[in-house]
Image (cartoon, coloured by chain):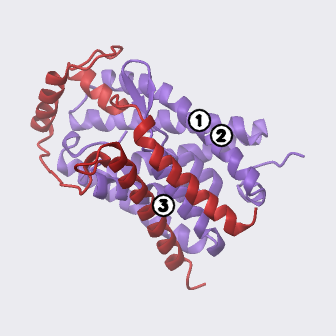
Chain colours: A purple, B red
């Protein structure tokens, strides 16, 4: 879902940068005020792992592929949507600058879509679902799927504003592909959460809204 | 496992994914690219095959629409290292993992320092 430079006019790209910078500032404030020092290695490893898994595009039907975004996972494990903004900003910065994956002028839009939308949708849908389902793994699966799907629809709207995609066809094709790619996101979010909670049971208590079983 | 071993395990897993990535990743266009090629006539939305010629002209067309001609020469475009095929890709993705790791750790330490 990494938007390249050519897809958005520069004035609009600048507007997305401005919005993204507000959330980046808030994520830095989260790190300063809420992130515990002993969590720093976990945050760094999550960011590095998300960077790595984003390099694996998994084939889906229709000659297309997709990879995990990781925003929902970061937000759930670290207990804040701003954690996802923090982690995804780092990942997108390295991807854009070192590897040309995602544009530079449009990096704000990519941070907004994957970090902010992905993180907020992932975190709050997880909280809401887990309060009802009381099982973190199906909740994480659904939250991962939704984070991908909503981020894709927002991207389609941005493409329509840019004049790159017609709105209806953009929503339809982005929605179709990412409804499937969302299954990858949901599956990997649930599996990664299970592995992390197994290795660090203390995090289960800290990931807000999680009810501990057994 | 104690904390130190968990940190080592996490780093090893991230690096293992990085090294494996070029060998297992699909070369198909991603969801956004596929939608783009579909809309610009280089591929059917539900189709499997991509018309490479039409894909190249789609990229020209979109620059004409948005006027965004910004180009940036990244050191490892598309995760490649010139002269080295897949092993080179493994190497630069692993390098990316280490950059993210060090940057995340450093930034985290700085931000949590004065408490």
**How would you rate the neighbour count of disc 3 (Cα within 10 Å): few for under 14, some for 14-19, many for 20 or more?**
many
Q: What element carries label 1?
A: helix
Q: Is residue A54 visible?
A: yes
Q: Mark 3 points at which residue?
A: A86
Q: Quadrant of residue A17?
A: bottom left
Are the residues flagged by discs 2 and 1 from a single subunit?
yes
Q: Name the residue under label 1.
A: A186
- CB within 8 Å, label 1 to label 3: no
Which residue occupies the extreme bottom position in the image? B114
**How would you rate the neighbour count of disc 1 (Cα within 10 Å): few for under 14, some for 14-19, many for 20 or more?**
many
Q: Can residue A116 be seen in this view?
A: no
Q: Is residue A18 left or right of residue B9?
A: left
Place of residue A47 in the rendered image (x, y in percent of width and height, measured from the top left): 51, 57
Circle 1 marks a residue in which chain?
A
Disc tally is 3
As displayed, is residue A40 above or below residue B14? below
Q: Is residue A113 left or right of residue B15?
A: left
Circle 2 marks a residue in which chain?
A
Q: Which mark is on residue A190?
A: 2
Viewer-proximal residue, A38 or B96?
A: B96
As displayed, is residue B45 above or below residue A104? above
- CB within 8 Å, label 2 to label 1: yes
Place of residue A24 in the rendered image (x, y in percent of width and height, measured from the top left): 42, 62
Place of residue A119 in the rendered image (x, y in percent of width and height, measured from the top left): 52, 49
Q: Is mark 2 on a helix, strand or loop?
A: helix
Q: Is residue B31 left or right of residue A180?
A: left
Mark earlier in primary sequence (1, 3): 3
As displayed, is residue A7 above or below residue A47? above
């Amino acid at each position: 879902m990494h938007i390249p430079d050519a897809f958005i006019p520069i004035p609009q790209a600048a507007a997305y940068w401005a919005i993204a910078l507000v959330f980046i500032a808030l994520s830095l404030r989260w790190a300063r005020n809420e992130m515990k020092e002993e969590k720093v290695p976990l945050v760094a490893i999550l960011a590095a792992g998300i960077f790595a898994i984003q390099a694996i595009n998994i084939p889906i039907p229709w000659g297309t592929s997709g990879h995990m975004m990781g925003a929902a996972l970061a937000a759930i494990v670290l207990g804040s949507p701003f954690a996802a903004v923090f982690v995804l900003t780092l990942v997108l910065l390295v991807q854009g600058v070192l590897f040309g994956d995602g544009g530079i002028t449009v990096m704000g839009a990519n941070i907004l879509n994957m970090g902010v939308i992905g993180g907020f949708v992932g975190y709050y849908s997880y909280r809401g679902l887990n309060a009802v389902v009381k099982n973190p793994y199906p909740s994480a699966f659904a939250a991962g799927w939704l984070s991908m799907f909503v981020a894709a629809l927002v991207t389609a709207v941005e493409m329509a504003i840019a004049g790159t995609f017609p709105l209806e066809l953009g929503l339809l094709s982005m929605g179709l592909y990412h409804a499937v790619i969302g299954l990858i996101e949901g599956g990997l979010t649930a599996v990664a959460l299970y592995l992390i909670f197994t290795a660090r049971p203390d995090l289960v208590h800290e990931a807000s809204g999680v009810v501990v079983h057994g | 496992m104690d904390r130190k071993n968990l940190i080592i395990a996490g780093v090893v897993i991230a690096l293992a994914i990085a090294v494996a990535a070029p060998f297992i990743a699909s070369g198909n266009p991603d969801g956004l690219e596929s939608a783009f090629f579909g809309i610009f006539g280089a591929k059917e939305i539900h189709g499997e095959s991509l018309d490479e010629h039409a894909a190249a002209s789609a990229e020209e067309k979109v620059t004409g629409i948005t006027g965004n001609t910004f180009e940036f020469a990244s050191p490892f475009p598309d995760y490649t290292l010139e002269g080295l095929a897949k092993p080179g890709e493994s190497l630069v993705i692993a390098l990316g993992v280490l950059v993210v790791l060090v940057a995340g750790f450093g930034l985290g330490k700085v931000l949590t320092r004065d408490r």
